[in-house]
Amino acid sequence: MHAGSLQLSATGAPAIDPLWRDQLGLLLESTGEGVFGIDLAGHCMFINRAAARLLGWEAGQVLGRNMHELTHHSHADGTHYPDVACPIFNAFRQGLPCRIDTEVFWRRDGGSFPVEYSSHPILDGRDVRGAVVTFVDITDRKRARDALQQANAELAEAKSALEHRVAERTRELTLALERQRELAAYSDQVREEERTRIAREVHDELGSLLVALRMDVNWLDKRLSEQAAGDTGDAQALRERMRSKCRNMGRLIENAVGNVGRIITDLRPTILDHQGLWAALEWQAGEFVRSSELLLDWAPDLAGQALPELPDRAAMAVFRIFQEMLSNVGRHAQATRVGVRIGLDGGVLRLSVQDNGRGAAAETFEAPTAYGVLGMRERARPFGGRIEIAAAPGQGCAVTLCMPLP
């Protein structure tokens, strides 16, 4: 090692063996960290070249000088830093080692740089002789940390903005969905009212006309039969043909009356108005099994409770949902038996249709194309109702309407 590689002050150098001194000098010079030692007055006793270079001095210019006044006299904002508050000096004043990464050292040119430094007391037995200080320039580290903090702040801000936009969009979609559901419920109401109006007009107008026409045809047939006694052969043959036409017209009118009745029932079952919802449900179940040739298990489970009458809109919703339940059995189940259960559970109506058909996987009923199930749920929603489905392949299917009663 060259004599000038490690600078020791003449007054502060401890009396050690030259070989050990050379080894110590090599050790201090081999590190990239700045290292210097100070005595109890804060004067520099030794300093390696890395420390001198970082501070902008030659090593010999620093020896013997007060290191706090030289490199640590001010905070980063330029305010005075008294040595009584200096953690470096506390290492030998109070015997307290420290490690600090929030302060700056000052260069010879008046500029500062952020440092991470540690200060440890130099002990001679139990006596403190000074302190050794190691430090590194953490400008790049601090710049990277600041950049990371800024990036995190920007990321947090972007995340907050995104969450705000997502929340706002969710609110908009929720509002749009509620409006769509309100519109759908209103459309159902208007459609049922229009069906009721058309059914009544068909019944009152067309039904009355068909009845009058049937009476007229019967009257004409009767008159023709009364005047047949005095007819000649040709006249009698003509009269018989006319009576045959009257009878054919009567049959056609009867068919028309039946078709009109069926159309009226499809539009608005008259039994719903005359006998109420519960009779209408039983009638609809009977009509379904007669047309589909299935066995019906009709088993209301009321435990002596009376079924209350529902408001017209709710009653119609229950009836239409029940129709859709039966229709799904007829279209998809391939069943031989269908069971209907009606019960009351804590003020909640439970109307269930169960079949012994081929069943289906549960996710089938949640598919976007399961329009029948979707329609039933949307009909039940305005009244606080819900649709429960229990199904499995090969084990049939049970669809239950749960609706709070008023």
Image (cartoon, helix red, strand yellow):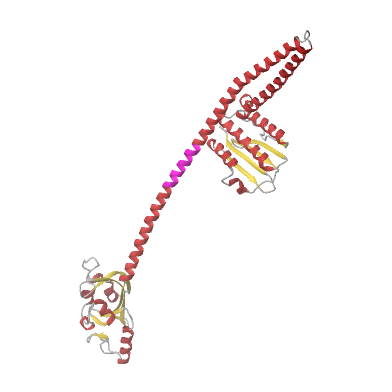
Q: Does the magenta stretch include residue 177?
A: yes
In magenta, the rendered stretch is 168-182
Q: Position of residue 359 (x, y in %)?
A: 67, 46
Task: Give the quadrant of the N terminus.
Answer: bottom left
Q: Position of residue 173 (x, y in %)?
A: 46, 44
Specify whether 341 is left or right of 88.
right
Q: Does the magenta stretch include residue 365?
A: no
- Where on the picture, by quarter, is residue 375? top right
Specify whether 78 is left or right of 393.
left
Q: Where is residue 332 in the image (x, y as percent from the top left)?
A: 66, 42
In depth, the one of 264 and 236 nearer the eye is: 236
Q: Can residue 311 be seen in this view?
A: no
How many numbered badges does the structure rendering display? 0
In depth, the one of 123 and 180 nearer the eye is: 180
Compared with 367, 130 (above or below) is: below
Q: Where is residue 321 in the image (x, y as percent from the top left)?
A: 60, 36
Task: Give the quadrant of the C terminus.
Answer: top right
Compared with 4, 395 (above or below) is: above
**Residue sticking out furthest to the top:** 230
Residue at 72% in and 19% down: 245
Q: Is the magenta stretch mostly helix, strand or loop?
A: helix
